[in-house]
Image (cartoon, rainbow, N blue to C red):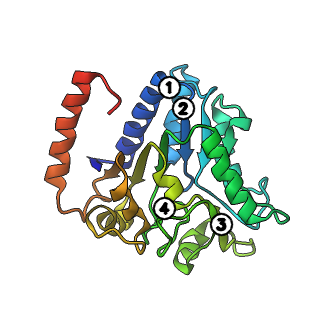
């Protein structure tokens, strides 16, 4: 695992935008695994700005989002499909038919939706790079604590803590879903690279447990320790509970020298 510690949230977004732009130069038809929430917003803004300047194109890119709420329509302003259109898809040249979220309507069978999503990812050739944030309880996607490391796209019940953390985004009279379809942990671990992005002091405890704690389904993000190409990109606040910061910084310097030498995507 590589741990990249940067000063600010903006630096995290720029770091990620630089690498995604490089990846798209090397592989213009890459398949990206995307996330919603606060964490990737600055990254989406940077990528949209670069597109507007003609520096990057998404026209051959395919995307698979981690999760989608159950119980609200795709067109609802609270759906993750709407978030993605507003924050990213609508601002770049990606064809909407190349974008996927695990939407399960009221008449769909969730098991079938889950298997079809897994099938679509496989048919697309797998995910080249999967991005995600981390919940304060260590969740990734909506894989809440106790999620199996063997899990695939399926329905998860959100914890009361997650519901309460997300309640700020819903008005009091609005329906807030308690269920979601989410890629499983095994789905995420199948991606060729995985990036965990975290910013802010409120993520420090979860980041510390995920990186330096034991591998445990109680901290779903600790599954990253099993991945051969996992990168954690954090700002100083989110890194504040890590014990081995000197080593992480040194390792990044050494690896960057090596990447320059071989001209590879670090
Ligand atoms: P956030 O959420 O990016 O809004 O902090 C991350 C998550 O809960 O997975």
Q: What label does residue 30 carry, if any? A: 2
Report the disc number at residue 27. 1
Q: Which residue sits at x=61%, y=44%? A: 122
Crowd tier of the residue under label 1, counting other residues whose Cα lies within 10 Å: few below 14, some 14–19, many 20 or above? few
How far apart are the alpha carbons under marks 2 and 1?
5 Å
Q: Position of residue 109 (x, y in %)?
A: 79, 65
Q: Is residue 7 left or right of residue 82?
A: left
Question: Quick check: 27 above or below 160?
Answer: above
Q: Earlier in the sequence, mark 3 or mark 4?
A: 4
Residue at 64 percent across and 40 percent down: it is 123
Label 4 beta carbon less than 8 Å to ligand 1: yes
Q: Earlier in the sequence, mark 3 or mark 2?
A: 2
Q: Secondary structure at mark 2?
A: loop
Q: Nearer the viewer, residue 88 or 178?
A: 178
The residue wearing badge 4 is: 140
For the residues labelled 3 and 4, say whether their Cβ atoms are less than 8 Å apart: no
Q: CA distance from mark 4 to mark 1?
A: 26 Å
Mark 3 — residue?
Answer: 180
């Amino acid at each position: 695992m590589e741990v990249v510690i940067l000063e600010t949230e903006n630096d995290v977004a720029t770091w990620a935008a630089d690498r995604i732009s490089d990846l798209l130069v090397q592989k213009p038809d890459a398949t990206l695994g995307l996330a919603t929430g606060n964490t990737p917003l600055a990254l989406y803004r940077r990528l949209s700005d670069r597109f507007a300047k003609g520096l990057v194109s998404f026209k051959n890119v395919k995307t698979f989002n981690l999760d989608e709420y159950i119980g609200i329509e795709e067109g609802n302003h609270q759906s993750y499909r709407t978030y993605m259109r507003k924050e990213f898809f609508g601002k770049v040249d990606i064809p909407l038919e190349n974008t996927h979220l695990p939407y399960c309507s009221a008449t769909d069978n969730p098991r079938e939706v889950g298997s079809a999503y897994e099938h679509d990812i496989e048919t697309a050739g797998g995910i080249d790079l999967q991005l995600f944030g981390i919940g304060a309880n260590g969740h990734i996607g909506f894989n809440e604590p106790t999620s199996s490391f063997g899990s695939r796209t399926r329905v998860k019940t959100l914890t009361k803590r997650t519901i309460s953390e997300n309640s700020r985004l819903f008005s009091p009279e609005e329906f807030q879903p308690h269920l979601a379809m989410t890629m499983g942990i095994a789905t995420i671990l199948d991606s060729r690279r995985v990036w965990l992005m975290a910013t802010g002091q409120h993520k420090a405890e979860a980041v510390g447990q995920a990186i330096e704690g034991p591998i445990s389904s109680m901290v779903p993000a600790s599954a990253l320790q099993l991945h051969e190409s996992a990168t954690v990109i954090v700002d100083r606040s989110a890194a504040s509970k890590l014990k081995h910061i000197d080593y992480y910084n040194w390792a990044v310097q050494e690896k960057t020298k090596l990447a320059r030498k071989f001209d590879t995507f670090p």
